[in-house]
Image (cartoon, grey):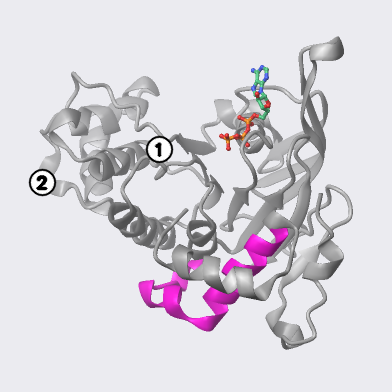
């Protein structure tokens, strides 16, 4: 779809400002994939294909996807609707199986990582049990995996503090705002101290103000937990604000067509970067990769809207 050669060739920008990496095929340059001290990558996907159904009605959802997420790294997936973002996340979570290729999570098959509770997962809908209190929702994974009462109590208190809901332990989900419910879902996903969080548009249903606040909260939470994150979103500014790298996918069959490295570590990111030139440049790079053109005038106009929070 995209003439990506254009995106990597911008004479008006300093060379080191151009952090977009071009990939001709579904190949994604690893950052930290071959760790010097032998820590396995959080996620390694190699040659992943996913086809649904057979014959003429077959849907080719993912094609030749290579993706490495280093331990502690925050990577967002962005791409047009139906390009296979959720499918890829579900494959990593072992909620679905590849047609071809391999996926490992911390060096293990995805299934083993699921059994070992190596990751936590959060979706667009918080998915809380309405009859349980906030504390009881957060506690659920710990209870299911046999933690003692005192362990559960201490961990739930710690998690609710982490997500800023220390005063709401006894509330029911319907007494909370959408953003607060999503924070409960994040606390629940973190309950077992996973080294990896898989998040599928967790802020997609929130209003823009709450959404930005949640993004800031998530950066803080990541700083405090050091978990790696694979984050699916439709919002370019959200992807850029949250990520060390933004992985851009093509329309179906989804391939990785570009990877934009965002300057600075996500764990040190603060709200004021949203207005800074590096940030706006990364937003522009992602948009260019997504839309397959490099029209600065269009990008600047669209950028004005996106800075205001459009997703
Ligand atoms: N279980 C399934 N059976 C058949 N087709 C499926 C299944 N799951 C996903 N698909 C198809 O695979 C393609 C990719 O779907 P997926 O949900 O991964 O896309 P997406 O990029 O996450 O989309 P969106 O941004 O709209 O959420 C779509 O065409 C979808 O219809």
Q: Quadrant of residue 55?
A: top right
x, y percent for residue 296: 66, 75
Task: Please check the rendered image and state whether residue 93 is part of the magenta-colored stretch, yes or no.
Answer: no
Is 22 left or right of 229, judged from the image as shown? Answer: right
* Image position of 175 (left or right of 291): left
Q: How far apart are the alpha carbons under marks 1 and 2?
A: 19 Å
Q: Crowding near pointer 2: few (<14 within 10 Å), some, many (20+)?
A: few
Q: Is 302 displayed left or right of 152 in the figure?
A: right
| Badge number at residue 189 | 1
Residue 119 in the image, given as x and y percentages of width and height: 52, 38
Badge 1 residue CB within 8 Å of ligand 1? no
**From which residue to which does the magenta span run?**
264-289
Tell me what residue is drawn at x 82 percent, y 62 percent. 4
Query: Is the residue at mark 2 in contact range of ligand 1, meaning its CB lies under 8 Å from it?
Result: no
Mark 1 or mark 2, earlier in chain: 2
Residue hosting label 2: 167
Give the camera-side residue of 248 and 226: 248
Q: Is residue 271 magenta?
A: yes
Q: For mark 1, give the secondary structure.
A: helix
- For residue 27, above or below residue 175: below
């Amino acid at each position: 779809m995209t003439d990506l050669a254009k995106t990597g060739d911008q004479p008006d920008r300093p060379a080191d400002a151009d952090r977009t990496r071009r990939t001709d095929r579904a190949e994604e340059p690893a950052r930290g994939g071959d760790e010097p001290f032998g820590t396995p990558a959080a996620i390694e996907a190699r040659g992943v294909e996913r086809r649904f159904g057979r014959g003429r009605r077959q849907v080719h959802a993912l094609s030749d996807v290579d993706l490495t997420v280093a331990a502690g790294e925050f990577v967002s997936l962005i791409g047009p609707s139906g390009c296979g973002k959720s499918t890829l996340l579900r494959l990593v979570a072992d909620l679905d199986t590849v047609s071809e290729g391999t996926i490992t999570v911390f060096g293990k098959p995805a299934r083993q990582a699921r059994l070992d509770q190596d990751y936590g997962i959060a979706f667009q809908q918080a998915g809380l049990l309405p009859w349980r209190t906030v504390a009881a929702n957060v506690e659920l994974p710990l209870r299911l995996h046999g933690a003692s009462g005192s362990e559960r109590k201490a961990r739930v208190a710690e998690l609710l503090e982490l997500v800023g809901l220390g005063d709401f332990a006894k509330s029911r989900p319907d007494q909370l705002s959408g953003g607060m419910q999503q924070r409960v879902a994040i606390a629940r996903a973190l309950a077992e101290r996973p080294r990896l969080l898989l998040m599928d548009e967790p802020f997609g249903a929130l209003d823009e103000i709450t959404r930005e606040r949640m993004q800031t909260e998530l950066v803080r939470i990541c700083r405090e937990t050091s978990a790696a994150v694979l984050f699916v979103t439709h919002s370019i500014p959200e992807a850029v604000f949250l990520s060390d790298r933004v992985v851009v996918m093509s329309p179906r069959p989804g391939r990785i067509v570009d990877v934009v490295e965002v300057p600075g570590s996500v764990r040190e990111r603060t709200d004021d970067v949203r207005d800074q030139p590096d940030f706006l440049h990364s937003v522009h790079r992602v948009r260019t990769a997504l839309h397959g053109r490099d029209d600065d005038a269009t990008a600047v106009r669209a950028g004005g809207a996106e800075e205001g929070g459009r997703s």
